[in-house]
Amino acid sequence: MKPLGNLAQSARAKQLSSARSTLIFVGILTLAANGFLYYNAEAEITKVLDAEVAKAGPGAVVDQVKFAEVKQNAINAIRIIYGGAAALGVVFITLGALIFKAPVAMVVTGLVLYITANAIFFVINPASLASGVIVKAVIIFLLFRSAMAAFAYQREAALEAAKADGPEDLEPFDRPPPASP
């Protein structure tokens, strides 16, 4: 039974390594994409506002002071969103790096943050849900599967530690049956 337990624990450790790779990949992708969008925020807002002015027609009068104020407020707002998302990328990288310290906490936190971030972006822009839906589904599946492995890995590690300390530290159902008289 011991070799089978070690083999299963080894497989779970490989799944945790996969979870680490997934979290770090998601983190790097999130950081890079949102870092670029943060850097490009002014051009993005200028393009949108110029299109709105063009829609108003050639004879439209635009208050330049108010226009500049609206533009700056929009740039600040979008940079807060992109900056927050880039910071989330750093969090994913950190969770991946620390996954073997507290497997369940890191994987479940990553899964919850990923789903929550996508829900927030859906509220901000409903079209974002359909954007990359297959990739998002795969990431959620991988993180969910990793969470299951993390629970099993952490439980097995705790059980092994308790066995090393002695049978009195084991839960009643983990103790060997008493010897028959």
Image: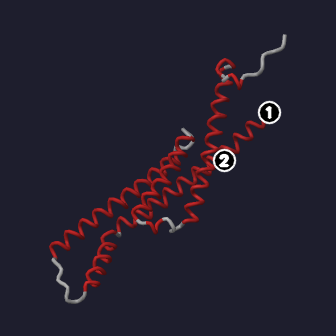
Mark 2 / mark 1, whichever is N-terminal: 1
Q: Amino acid at mark 2?
A: Lys
Q: Position of residue 179 (x, y in %)?
A: 81, 15
Question: At numbered mark 1, what does the secondary structure look like: helix, strand or loop?
Answer: loop
Q: Residue tagged by mark 1?
A: 1
Q: Residue at x 29, y 79 (%)?
A: 52
Q: Amino acid at mark 1?
A: Met
Q: Is residue 181 above or below residue 66?
A: above
Please tell me in which quadrant of the rendered image residue 173 appears.
top right
Q: Position of residue 146 (x, y in %)?
A: 61, 48
Q: Position of residue 140 (x, y in %)?
A: 57, 55
Q: Is residue 60 above or below residue 14?
A: below
Label 2 crowd bin: few (<14), some (14–19), many (20+), radius 10 Å = some
Question: At numbered mark 2, what does the secondary structure look like: helix, strand or loop?
Answer: helix
Q: Is residue 124 above or below residue 46?
A: above
Please tell me in which quadrant of the rendered image residue 136 appears.
bottom right
Q: Residue at x 28, y 76 (%)?
A: 49
Viewed as shown, does residue 83 lie left or right of 1?
left
Q: Residue tagged by mark 2?
A: 14
